[in-house]
């Protein structure tokens, strides 16, 4: 039987799909104008002119895509339950870390106290 896809898995695959789409879109926006410039330079005999124009157009198109992507990403609705769960995880992790550090501090202090008591009762061998 096939397992069901969880919402987290679906979200991850959607992110992968978006990233691949963005990568191909930006690559196409850069490569197609440059290749077009090279073809025009070869056909018309104006060596770097149309290639440089293709580079400029490609960079402008890629920049436009990034700006559009940023605007679209800012419009994505945020799941309040997921945000609250992430916040609660951070709070729980911080609390666990605080408790752990407190335990380490107590143990270290106990070891120091035991060491001091031991040194007060019996002199060390190098002091005899």
Image (cartoon, rainbow, N blue to C red):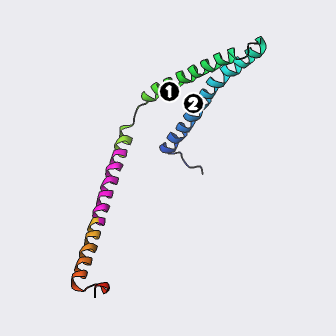
- Relative to residue 20, is residue 68 drawn left or right? left
Is residue 103 magenta-colored?
A: yes
- Relative to residue 85, is residue 105 drawn left or right? left
Q: Which span of residues is magenta-colored? A: 86-104
Which residue position is annotated with label 2?
22
Which residue position is annotated with label 1?
69
* SS at circle 1: helix
Q: CA distance from mark 1 to mark 2?
A: 8 Å
* SS at circle 2: helix
Give residue 34's position: percent from left, percent from top: 67, 21
**Mark nearer the N terminus (1 vs 2):** 2
Q: Residue at image x 70%, y 21%?
A: 35
Q: Residue at image x 31%, y 66%?
A: 104
Q: Residue at image x 25%, y 85%?
A: 123
Is residue 26 magenta-colored?
A: no
- Relative to residue 91, is residue 77 drawn left or right? right
Depth check, front residue: 80 or 119: 119
Q: Are marks 1 and 2 in contact (CB under 8 Å)?
A: yes
Q: Residues within 10 Å of mark 2 (few under 14, many from 20)?
A: some
User: Chief secondary structure of the magenta span?
Assistant: helix
Depth check, front residue: 83 or 99: 99
* Residue 85 found in image quarter: top left
Q: Residues within 10 Å of mark 1 (few under 14, many from 20)?
A: few
Residue sticking out furthest to the top: 44
> Does residue 117 lie above or below 99 as drawn?
below
């Amino acid at each position: 039987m096939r397992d069901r896809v969880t919402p987290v898995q679906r979200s991850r695959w959607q992110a992968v799909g978006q990233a691949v789409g963005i990568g191909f879109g930006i690559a196409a926006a850069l490569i197609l104008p440059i290749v077009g410039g090279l073809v025009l330079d070869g056909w018309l005999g104006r060596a770097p002119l149309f290639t440089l124009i293709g580079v400029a157009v490609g960079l402008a198109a890629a920049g436009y895509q990034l700006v559009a992507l940023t605007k679209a990403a800012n419009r994505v609705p945020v799941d309040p339950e997921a945000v609250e769960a992430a916040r609660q995880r951070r709070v729980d992790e911080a609390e666990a870390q605080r408790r752990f550090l407190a335990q380490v501090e107590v143990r270290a202090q106990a070891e120091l106290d035991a060491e001091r008591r031991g040194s007060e009762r019996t002199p060390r061998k190098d002091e005899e």
